[in-house]
Amino acid sequence: MKRLLLPLILLVPLLLAGTAEACAGCSNPNLPVGRSAGSVLKSGEVSATLNLTTTAVNVVHSEHCPDIGPICREREEPPQLHDQMLYAGELRPILEVGLTERFGLEAQVPLRITRTTVLFRRLDGTVFAPDYVNIHHRNETLMGIGDPWVSGRGAWAPGGVAIVGRAGVSLPLGRTEANPFALGQQGLTHQHIQFGTGTFNPVLSLDVAKSLGRFRLQGYGQAQLFLYRNRHGYQAGNRFAAGTSVDTAVVRRLRVALGVDVLNEQPERWDGEVQQDGNVGRTDVLAGATVLYPLGALAVGLSVKVPVYQHFIQVGHTHDGVPGQLTYPAIVNLMLHRDFEF
């Protein structure tokens, strides 16, 4: 599986042009959750969706002694730039089961993979190879499950409007890390990327769809709430998402959709504090297009969403008087969907 996912994660986002920029430091990338078809299920019906979501993030910031690491206690190390690439991908199976004409269950189990590479540069941009181990960044590939979701779902169709609501909880099964900022202050190697939260978190969502002649209008809202810190002192920031789209058939069974998504992630906290070199929270507006095509009983969808606006919520620290850079060209999602009966 790792051999299949990694080429997609490395290559697809690099083919796209647009970028969004803002300040950044050490990053723990979180991808927006790929969604199911949001269909109304009857008793005995099963809906299976497989989402592969990927992007490539470039993070650049400067670093000075003593923050560079233990080498600063041995010699006067010149300031440097950390130019890091994070290739993030998530494979998320979603299974929905209709128990009655209105109510059902849903389960999601994400598999996450992140490939990181780093170039060390002088402040003039010249690449150099440190003769010591950097405690902050390294070339590595990380893979593991994220926090699964288990939800109850209710579906209604008043006046031809399909409404699907979900309420559930995420389970703390993804890997978590000790406080990387505390370890960094001690001059110890640490890890910022973690695949889980270490807490039970409420998840709420609502999907609405309506067909109007050739066109189908859809909208959704979703909230992930993080109410307390885990055993390492980490508390993720609440995440909210909302979007709307319209799709229509263009040739025979091929459908094309255009849409807008708004993603909001509040700052994360370690021991109750927002770390200015960590995830300070942000709001992104994405504009995207999706193509949908049925292959027999299997529906295939490919979407590309490009950031058109980005705002970082709680930015206080800058490097050398200017913010660092965080850029990503687009978020790409491949969806496979099929309905069954039992």
Image (cartoon, rainbow, N blue to C red):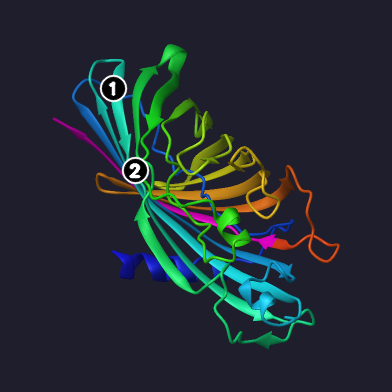
Q: Three-letter amino acid code at disc 1?
A: Gly
Give the residue drawn at x 74%, y 69%.
Answer: 62
Give the alpha-carbon distance from disc 2 to disc 1, as whole Å.
23 Å
- The dot on residue 173 is 2
Front label number (2 vs 1): 2
The residue that mark 1 highlights is: 104
| Viewer-proximal residue among 86 and 314 | 314
* Magenta-colored stretch includes residue 338: yes
Label 1 residue SS? strand
Quadrant of the rendered image containing residue 53? bottom left
Q: Is residue 86 left or right of residue 112?
A: right
Can see residue 140? yes
Instruction: Name the element at disc 2.
Output: loop
Instruction: Say left or right for 319 vs 2.
Output: right
Image quadrant holding the N terminus, namely bottom left
Q: Which amino acid does label 2 sit on?
A: Leu
Q: Where is residue 268 in the image (x, y as percent from the top left)?
A: 60, 42
Q: Residues within 10 Å of mark 1 (few under 14, many from 20)?
A: many
Query: Is residue 132 rendered to the left or right of residue 284?
Result: left
Quadrant where the image shows the C terminus: top left
The magenta segment is 326-342
Q: Which residue lies furthest to the right in this view?
A: 321
Q: How crowded is mark 2: few (under 14 residues within 10 Å), some or many (20 or more)?
A: some
Is 28 inside the magenta-drawn segment? no
